Structures are given as structure tokens and as C-alpha cells.
Amino acid sequence: MSAYQRTIQAFVQVIKSEPALFSPEDWLSITELMDSLPDDSEEIANGIRKWLKLESRSQIKQAFDKKRQEIPGLTESNNTLFAGGATSPTPPNQPSKLSQELIKNPIKLNSPLSDDKKSQPKP
């Protein structure tokens, strides 16, 4: 797994496992950031790292750093390994639409500002 993909995957894990760390402003700004970035793993990873630099996001950054260390950095025959050992269908050095979807979906599902979440019935 490339360093960029590790960054994206670690951030997604933080979104899924610790959504309470994100303030409403954080949810709004990360959504806007993801909407503004091209569908390129390097650009997305760099955007995440820049976003995490704000002092008010230090707890999110700590959780992110911990998750990132837990993810092995494996590559095998130029195909990136994803969860479960699946390889990327995208050729090396080509933008992957999976990168943006990988991060946008958990944001939509975990953000208290999301319309998708508001429309779900309460138990």
C-alpha cells in the first residue's frame, strides 16, 4: 500500500471509529476539502495532512497517527493491497476514483450535518 493510500485509509478509520472527535465545523471543512480536491490519492493525502495541522484538530491528528502506524505498507507486483488482500484495479500512477469515494462515503455516514443521516429513521 502506498503512503498516500495509507494516509487515506487511516483517516477513514478515524472518521468511522471516532466521529465524536470532529466538531460540526470540522465536518463542514473536511467535506468542502474533499469536494475541492481532484480524484488523486496523492492530492487527497496531502490535503488530509494539511487539514490535520490546525491546532484545534490535534486530537484527530493523534488518532490519525495511531491508525496510520497500525496499517502495514505493503505492495506486491505493483498492485496495491487493500483490506482483505484485494488489489487495486487501477493501473499504477493512474488516479483512482476509489480514493475519493473511500473517504466521502464515511464522511456522509458519520457527519451529523449529513442529509443522508438525517433522513434515516430513529430506532
Image (cartoon, rainbow, N blue to C red):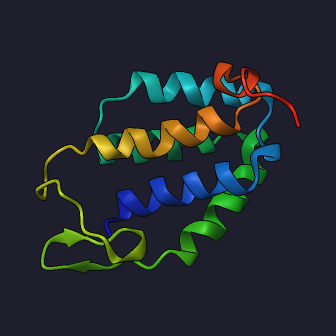
Q: Give the residue at x 66% y 52%.
A: 16
Q: Position of residue 4 (x, y in %)?
A: 36, 57
Q: Position of residue 109 (x, y in %)?
A: 64, 37
Residue 23 or residue 83, whichever sits in front: 83
Q: Give the residue at x 18% y 57%.
A: 89
Residue 9 horizontal side relative to residue 27, left or right: left
Q: Give the residue at x 65% y 48%.
A: 15
The image quadrant that residue 73 belongs to is bottom left
Q: Quadrant of the C terminus?
A: top right
Residue 44 horizontal side relative to residue 61, left or right: left
Q: Position of residue 23 (x, y in %)?
A: 80, 33
Q: Is residue 73 above or below residue 22?
A: below
Residue 46 or residue 5, whichever sits in front: 5
Residue 18 horizontal side relative to residue 97, left or right: right
Q: Is residue 46 above or below residue 81?
A: above
Residue 68 horizontal side relative to residue 101, left or right: right
Q: Quadrant of the N terminus?
A: bottom left
Q: Position of residue 74 (x, y in %)?
A: 32, 79
- Counting every numbered tag in the picture gives 0
Q: Is residue 6 above or below residue 108?
A: below
Q: Give the residue at x 30% y 35%.
A: 39
Residue 66 or residue 82, whichever sits in front: 82
